[in-house]
Image (spheres, helix red, strand yellow):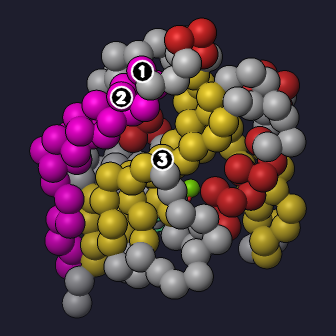
């Protein structure tokens, strides 16, 4: 397979340093009594390396949880189900972390679902945002923008493989 590295591990790490500073500033600007009521929620499986590397760069105190959000049934998009007790986000500022925002359908559904609880706020943060018209959701924070191309590595899968790559790649040719 001919491929090229789109974002190197060094570039990812440097950009995560900047994002961690941005998120620390966001948290430090919350009302004082709410600053320790922050929960990051990663969407499995693509978020794994992003969450692990990013949260270890964040200095502010926070909780960390993961959910598996599935909106596909027999390859058709169905209602979103999440394996989380929504009550656990009550009274918290939620920051959802995902690998990529493509059409935005997943993040839009997850935000709607979590809004059924009583969080103080919900923000979304992705490693990669695809530039597309008519997105159903635009993330509040993003590390990289890409055109409408298929990418893999650093958590993003290519038919369930390649999540272990240290960098993000694109097929060429
Ligand atoms: P959505 O279209 O924004 O709902 O994206 C749904 C999911 O599709 C993402 O969370 C990824 O798991 C997957 N996905 C979308 N684009 C790519 C890609 O370029 N590479 C790997 N996975 C992708
Ligand atoms: Mg995903």
- In the rendered structure, which segment of residues is drawn in magenta? 1-28
**Circle number at residue 93:** none
Badge 1 element = helix
Q: Is residue 112 at all visible to an observer of this figure?
A: yes
Pick the front one: 59 or 11:
59
Report if the CB atoms under discs 3 and 1 are less than 8 Å apart. no
Badge 3 element = strand
> Upstream in the sequence, badge 3 or badge 1?
1
Left or right relative to 170: residue 105:
right
Identify the residue position indicated by label 1 in the image: 28
Q: Position of residue 127 (x, y in %)?
A: 39, 52
Question: Is 11 a magenta residue?
Answer: yes
In the image, farthest residue toward the bottom: 173
Report if the CB atoms under discs 2 and 3 are less than 8 Å apart. no
Q: Quadrant of residue 59?
A: top left
**The C terminus sits in image quarter:** bottom left
Identify the residue position indicated by label 3 in the image: 125
Badge 2 element = helix
Question: Is 120 a magenta residue?
Answer: no
**The N terminus sits in image quarter:** bottom left
Q: Position of residue 146 (x, y in %)?
A: 33, 72
> Upstream in the sequence, badge 2 or badge 3?
2
Image point (71%, 50%), residue name: 111
Left or right relative to 18: residue 145:
right
Identify the residue position indicated by label 2 in the image: 25
- Which label sits in the foreground, 2 or 3? 2
């Amino acid at each position: 397979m001919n491929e090229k590295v789109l974002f190197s591990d060094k570039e990812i790490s440097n950009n995560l340093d900047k994002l961690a500073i941005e998120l620390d500033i966001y948290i430090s600007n919350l009302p004082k009594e709410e600053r320790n009521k922050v929960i990051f929620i990663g969407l499995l499986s693509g978020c794994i390396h992003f969450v692990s590397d990013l949260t270890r760069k964040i200095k502010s105190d926070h909780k960390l949880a993961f959910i598996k959000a599935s909106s596909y049934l027999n390859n058709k998009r169905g209602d979103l189900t999440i394996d989380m007790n929504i009550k656990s986000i009550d009274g918290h500022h939620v920051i959802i972390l995902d690998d990529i925002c493509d059409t935005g359908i997943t993040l839009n559904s997850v935000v709607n679902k979590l809004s059924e609880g009583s969080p103080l706020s919900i923000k979304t943060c992705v490693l990669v945002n695809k530039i597309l018209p008519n997105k159903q959701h635009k993330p509040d924070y993003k590390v990289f923008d890409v055109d409408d191309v298929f990418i893999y590595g650093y958590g993003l899968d290519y038919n369930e493989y390649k999540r272990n790559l240290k960098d993000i790649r694109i097929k060429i040719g």
